[in-house]
Amino acid sequence: MRQRKLIVLFLVISFCIPLCGCAVPELSDIPVDSAESNQRDERRFDTAAMKELVQAYRDSWENIETDLQAQIDDVLAAVDEAYAIYCRVQIDSYSDWENDALYELSNACIEDFYVSEEIAAWFFANGCKHSTDTALFEPYIEAEHIPYYLANNLSRIMAYARSDAALQSERIHDYYDLSKEADIDIDATNKRCAKIYLDMLKEMDVSEALFDLYHRDYSAAETSAAYQEIKEYFLPIRTAAEELLLYEDGLLTSDVLESDPYALLEQYAKQLSPSIAESAEKLFSENLYTRAEGENCYDGSFTLNLPNERRGLMYTYLDGSFYDWITVTHEFGHFHADWRDVTPIYLQNSNMDIAEAQSQSMVTLFLPYYDEIFGDDAEQKQLLVLLDLLDSVISGFAVGEFEYQVTQRLETITPSETAALFAEIMEECGVYLELYQVSHLFEQPGYYISYGVSALSALEMYTLASTDHQQALAIYDKLSGYSCLSGENSFRDVMQSCGFTDYFAPTAIGSLAERLNPIVENVNEQENTGHEAA
């Protein structure tokens, strides 16, 4: 069973780890300001102009008539602009994977974005110290970081930011270079990637298995306990679902999609709810999606939020299989929930669990239309969706358990032991993944458990969408109305306010399994009846 929905967005790390918390290079090694000399490129954000802007704003603070809030808004908007420029170049680069010029431009643009965030942080730190209304600036910077920005001039801050961004990028590139060697020696590749992973974790605060980085309201110990229940209750359901699917030469005969997934989305999304229809209209009328196909492109999918434009950008890799439909509806769930969210990039505190619940639940809303879309294959396709969600739960919690155990032994575990631990956990729950294949571990450590936790809510939506579609739509409209970017909402509170289960409560996993079993049993009975009739 292949892994799906991989997202390459190591920007999440930049949002969560202050640059000033990393090792600072020797100043003599950094050509201060020289990195800003090429900022007039039309596809680059002008960091030199932003530098001049914030310096001019700082110089105006002695004037009591200065509109400080307007200055703050300008600085936040500049960071949004830097991010939007990077996003578009990134999508272009991913769509043309072998284009070295685009690749280098993408690297330069992410450095520009890092720098823009640091310029903003310098501005807010100085505002807390020197402005006429210091309290106005306090929400924009943590107190412990202020001394760093006050002790260094802006040119130095910017140079450090470029150096730090390059270091982060270099590690990701090292991982990708190593992963390409897997066809030569998988075991050796896994061990070398494990070393990169451990080195990254040791430079980060990994208490609570990185959970604090993702603003979670459940603990790593709770997910570890849930993992044991998931193995007990969900593995048999997955096996039963797999046995009902038609295989030929080891491949699912129903794993094909004869229709264009975007054409299906455009046709059926407008039938779900007015708000979803509005999102579909925006997606198609403004051409905010990229469909990547073939070998010369990145083979993952993701959606990006552009708050300064009230837009989202979808990138989807399509390979002609039924999972194209799952991918497109999944990413549309992100798009629908996020494009109206105007939380500035600098202030975003992403709750990945809410985000993935919004996206994975969207997939289930189309289930009542499967008879119309897929005809005689509808039942098989519905089973594939169920199997995909079960796969997300099981693999998500399995990788989460691996990360939990690694963080508990971080000071002593070796790369060889790390690779062996990953293989052991994947084997015990029937997930066919190698360590080197899980890019999230290297780009967004701690993220992966969100796929599992959020897929539990999607499984609940699966049962509801099949029996009471109108109630499912009402619940989804409420769920998608919660911001996953503002940092104001926690997963368990949001889920329970929408009527979902608290998945970490006693017996919750077993109770959900009891609701899923009849779905598989019903398909089995129908197949047996059909065989007898034949």
Image: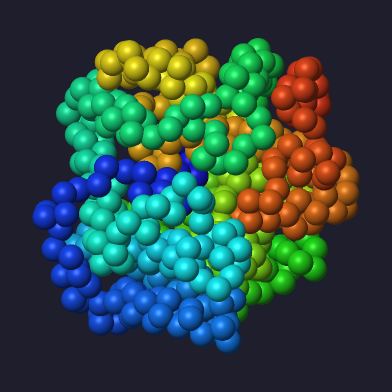
State the image quarter where residue 441 is shown. Answer: top left
Above or below residue 7? Residue 437 is above
State the image quarter where residue 188 is shown. Answer: top left
| Residue 280 horizontal/vertical position (percent) | 66, 69
Q: Nearer the viewer, residue 124 or 414?
A: 124
Above or below residue 518? Residue 5 is below
Q: For this view, does 193 lie left or right of residue 233? A: left
Q: Residue visible at 32% across and 43% down? A: 22
Q: Nearer the viewer, residue 193 or 249?
A: 193
| Residue 477 horizontal/vertical position (percent) | 79, 56
Q: Residue visible at 59% across and 76% down? A: 69
Direction left: furthest residue: 28
| Residue 101 horizontal/vertical position (percent) | 20, 67
| Residue 48 horizontal/vertical position (percent) | 29, 77
Q: Nearer the viewer, residue 436 or 128?
A: 128
State the image quarter where residue 502 is shown. Answer: top right
Q: Residue visible at 80% across and 68% down? A: 274
Q: For this view, does 532 lie left or right of residue 74? A: right
Query: Quick check: can you spot residue 77?
Result: no
Q: For this view, does 412 lie left or right of residue 210? A: left
**Quadrant of image for the C terminus:** top right
Q: Residue visible at 63% across and 16% down? A: 225
